[in-house]
Image: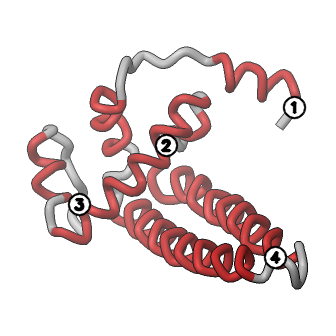
Amino acid sequence: MKVRSIVNWVKAPSPYKSFQEFWPHYLKLHKEPLVLREHERGTTSGLVSGALTSTLGGIGAVAIEMSELLILVPAVFGAVHAAVTYAILIPSHEKYGKNKAATLESLKHAWWSIRGDHKMWMYKKRGWLDEEFKKLGIQVPTK
């Protein structure tokens, strides 16, 4: 991404005033079953690696006298994992959904997308997602 593109992305306005307004837009971008599946897998791996990073960070904090490297490893692991996860999830929109990931629309949408990923994951795991699509009038293709 060029510097000018990054500046435009950071400054890009959002037509949505809140996450609640953004949520239906976010779900429309994830209605294709394969996009949804990839996001479910990515979010699950992110939550697992987050738990591992927290655990390793705790171990590192206890062992700070042994080596500062033990503190650095979890932080680097978490950042690398986030980069790799989104490097996989973002292209899934073009490949399966024939749309553009909300993360690429603006910085505000990137933050809301992370929140949306976790909300969508929770709704899927609890069996609420199909009802949410219906409630918002989003037509989901048959599997």
Graded by Cα atoms within 10 Å as few (under 14), some (14 to 19) or many (20 or more), the crowding at tag 1 reads: few
Can you tell which of label 2 and label 3 is closer to the viewer? 3
User: Would you name the residue on which mark 1 appears?
Assistant: 2
Q: From what the image shows, is residue 141 above or below residue 15? A: below
User: Would you name the residue on which mark 2 appears?
Assistant: 99
The local secondary structure at tag 2 comes to loop
Spatial CA distance of label 2 from label 1 is: 22 Å
Please tell me which residue is depicted at 67% across the width and 73% down the height of the picture. 57
Spatial CA distance of label 1 from label 3 is: 36 Å
Q: Where does the image place residue 72, in percent across and percent down from the top left?
A: 82, 69
Residue 17 horizontal side relative to residue 123, left or right: right
- Asked if the residue under mark 3 is in contact with the one under mark 4, i.e. CB atoms within 8 Å, the reply is no
Q: From what the image shows, is residue 136 above or below residue 121? A: above
Specify which label sits upstream in the sequence, 4 or 3.
4
Q: Which mark is residue 123?
A: 3
Specify which label sits upstream in the sequence, 4 or 1.
1
The local secondary structure at tag 4 comes to loop
User: Would you name the residue on which mark 4 appears?
Assistant: 64
Can you tell which of label 4 and label 1 is closer to the viewer? 4
Along the line of sight, the residue nearer the viewer: 78 or 142: 78
Amino acid tagged 3: Tyr
Q: Where does the image place residue 22, in percent across and percent down from the top left?
A: 35, 31
Amino acid tagged 1: Lys
